[in-house]
Image (cartoon, rainbow, N blue to C red):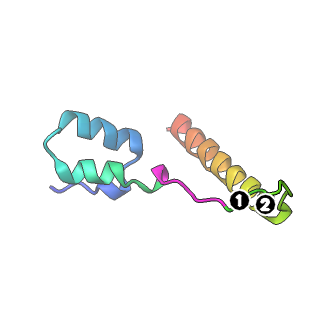
Amino acid sequence: MKLNFEEMSVPELRKYVLEHRDDMEAMRALFHHPSLKWKTMPPLATADGTQLEENIRIAEEAIRQRIDAENSRKSNESSE
């Protein structure tokens, strides 16, 4: 039976890779896991230091979403 690495969480995938170090497909899945990708943010200020309020709002919202997703994940793990 072939495992679906895309459905595995990072901790599950990390554990699998440590137990199957020769499985390059699993390693690639771990290194390219969507939750480990960085999100590029727009600049928060201009070169002269003027704050860009809209970009700050976008960054704050992205951070808030990341925190909410992490809290939801932890909540789901603790209820299992």
The amino acid marked with disc number 1 is Pro
10 Å crowding of disc 1: few (<14), some (14-19), many (20+): few
Between the residue at mark 1 and the residue at mark 2, the CA separation in whole angstroms equals 7 Å
Q: Helix, strand or loop at disc 2?
A: loop
**What residue is disc 2 on?**
46
Residue appearing at x 85%, y 57% in the figure? 51
| Quadrant assignment for the N terminus | bottom left
Q: Is residue 70 magenta?
A: no
Q: Position of residue 52 (x, y in %)?
A: 82, 62
Query: Are discs 1 and 2 less than 8 Å apart at CB?
Result: yes
Q: Is residue 10 left or right of residue 41?
A: left
Q: Position of residue 66 (x, y in %)?
A: 63, 50
Q: Quadrant of residue 42?
A: bottom right
Residue occupying image coordinates x 77% and y 58%: 47
Magenta-highlighted residues: 35-41
Instruction: State left or right for residue 4 relative to residue 42.
Output: left
Q: Is residue 32 left or right of residue 22?
A: right
Q: Which residue is mark 1?
A: 43
Q: Is residue 58 left or right of residue 22?
A: right
